[in-house]
Image (cartoon, rainbow, N blue to C red):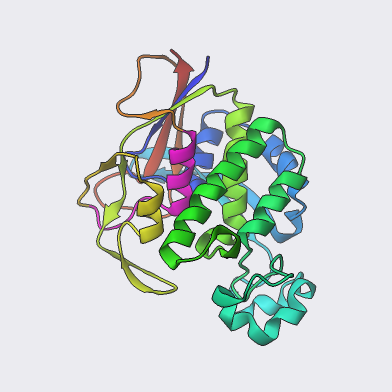
Amino acid sequence: MTTLYLDCFSGISGDMVIGALLDAGADLAQMEEELKKLNIESEYTLSQQKVNKNGITAVKFDVNLLGEKEHSHVHSHNHDHDHDHHHSHSHDHDHDHGHTHSHDHDHHDHRAYKQITEMIQAAGFNEAVTSMSLAIFKKIGEAEGKIHGLPLERVHFHEVGAVDSIVDIVGAAILLDQLGITNVYCSPIPTGSGHIHIDHGTYPVPAPATLEILKGVPIAQTLIKGELATPTGAAIAAVSADSFGTMPSMTVEKIGYGAGTKTFKDHPNVLRVVIGKE
């Protein structure tokens, strides 16, 4: 039995999870090879680098999107043939009534929930990776649907639907499987405080979808302003963790630190993972 403890003292995001697991000894090349089964590798490259966050060396994992960086110019991407017929009404994707081409891209490079699940199912991952990836996406999709008042099949992913979140979620499932993790425990999750600016305006932290995803998960109070837990990170924790609390009794074998994008004045913005035997 191999146990993983997610020590989320500075929150959790998809890239922090992958960075921490890579730092703990997981293999990026093998993950990259597995991810090719999704057939979207023309849309991104992956990189990892060591960074120092307030005195702690951590791995920063990045999904670098190819093509235009600006979403507003998404039409010039190398995959614009996928959504030529979508241009005329790409502004109203939130209420395009389940078109037969819901698998196509929107102006924010969104993908529909249904398309993502089909992509994962068609990829031919092993059962553990497939079921965990689908469960994490379902968790996010249901939360987004509830917030926006849409049934699951009508949910178009926004921040989460982009390629980087598909890579973060499926990548995390691949690495948990690769490391032979049998039990996952997680600390209470600080979500941050204050407000964030997203597509729809200014929102409280945690964002509504993140809070919905964290139902049943203990949230830790924090005075830090900013978004510490992303929907992707929250969903990975909510789905993978068997229970939440302090670190279990275990013999520690591997430790990894995954860096977040932000840097805070008073503490290292990293996710710590501890892997060992109970």
Residue 253 seen in the figure? no
Residue 180 seen in the figure? yes
Q: Nearer the viewer, residue 203 or 4?
A: 203
Residue at x 63%, y 69% (from the top left corner): 109
Report x, y in % for residue 97.
62, 74
Judge left or right: residue 209 versus residue 84. left
Residue at x 57%, y 54% (from the top left corner): 165
- Start and end of the magenta stretch? 224-240
Residue 25 location, quadrant: top right
Judge left or right: residue 271 versus residue 36. left
Q: Is residue 243 above or below residue 147?
A: above
Q: Is residue 156 above or below residue 239?
A: below
Report x, y in % for residue 91.
58, 82
Residue at x 41%, y 57% (from the top left corner): 209
Residue 174 location, quadrant: top right
State the residue lying farthest toward the right.
81
Residue at x 61%, y 58% (from the top left corner): 113
The number of discs equals 0
Q: Nearer the viewer, residue 86 or 233?
A: 86
Report x, y in % for residue 216.
34, 40
- Residue 230 inside the magenta-drawn segment: yes
Judge left or right: residue 104 versus residue 192. right
Judge left or right: residue 260 versus residue 38. left
State the residue lying farthest toward the bottom.
88
- Residue 105 inside the magenta-drawn segment: no
Report x, y in % for residue 201.
37, 75
Q: Is residue 192 above or below residue 97?
A: above
Quadrant (top left/top right/bottom left/bottom right) for the C terminus:
top left
Q: Is residue 75 above or below residue 151?
A: below
